[in-house]
Image (cartoon, grey):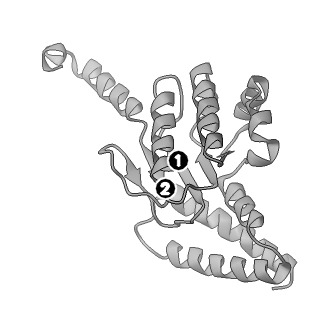
Amino acid sequence: MRLWLLGLSPLRTARSAAYRRWTEARLELTGRTAKEPHTQTHTATPSPGLLTARPEQMMFFVNAAEVRNAVWAAVTDEDPTPDVVLVDLRLTPDLDVPTIDALTELHERVDRVGAQLWLAGINPAVRERLTTAGLADLLGAEHLFDYFAGGLLAYLNRHTVGLDTRRGVLTELLEFIRSRLDQSDLDRPGRDTLTAVADRITRELQDHGT
């Protein structure tokens, strides 16, 4: 590798470095300890039963398999196995065939262990690709979310029964989110996500007179 790089212009060297960064397919995983040197971990909001993953770059043919494998490794590391794996695709503006194939295989792997794959941060172009490929039907339209916050609240809906219970859970969650927003170690995407969740929770509590 050193010999191959010898004599390259700064521009080509920079391009090579950028290519390597794409192929690292780094993820932020909620509730998981990083084991790979190129994997970053975000443990601000761990939730038993829910594993969230956010690729740090868009998914496309170069890194799709890497992202699939990293998410699957996180699933198999969890004990007990999560019942929902929520992948945030907000940085992915469109889907190519290798990425659709990688997501389809991830769905199949997750399904085999009794869990569900949910996708969030879905823009219209991505949703159209998922529909055309038939993956939207496999996952279920109710498991595709325009925003990451929508996926989190859907998971909450799944595991709360009764209005009083829901109010209590939402109130506690809102208090926790507000406490996290006051901390300085939260990056911009994380802060935006928590703010969106807090806004939705606040509106729902107001609608129910809480």
> How busy is the neighbourhood of tag 2: few (under 14 within 10 Å), some, or many (20 plus)?
some
Please name whichever residue, 98 or 79, is drawn nearer the observer in this view of the structure.
79
| Tag 2: amino acid | Glu
Q: Quadrant of the N terminus?
A: top left
Mark 2 touching mark 1, by CB under 8 A? Answer: no
Q: Quadrant of residue 205?
A: bottom right
Q: Is residue 65 above or below residue 9?
A: below
Q: Which mark is residue 78?
A: 2
Q: Tell me what residue is drawn at x 73 percent, y 31 percent.
A: 135
Callout 2: helix, strand or loop? loop
Which residue in the protein does label 1 denote?
54
Mark seen at residue 176: none
Residue shown at the point (48%, 66%) measured from the top left: 44
Mark 2 or mark 1, earlier in chain: 1
Task: For label 1, count other residues whose C-alpha is less than 10 Å away and answer few (under 14), some (14-19) or many (20+).
Answer: many
3 relative position to 45: left or right: left
Q: Secondary structure at mark 1?
A: strand
Q: Is residue 128 above or below residue 122?
A: above
The image quadrant of residue 90 is top right
Q: Nearer the viewer, mark 2 or mark 1?
A: 2
Amino acid type, residue under disc 1 in the picture: Arg
Rendering coords of residue 118 (x, y %): 68, 46
Where does the image place residue 108, in percent across and percent down from the top left?
64, 35
The residue positioned 73% from the left and 67% from the top of the image is 159
Residue 54 or 9: which is nearer the viewer?
54
Q: Give the quadrant of the C terminus.
A: bottom right
In the picture, measured across the screen, residue 171 lies left or right of residue 203, that is left
Marks 2 and 1 sit apart, C-alpha to C-alpha, by 17 Å
Question: Which residue is depicted at the point 48% across and 38% down?
Answer: 57
Q: Position of residue 34 (x, y in %)?
A: 36, 53
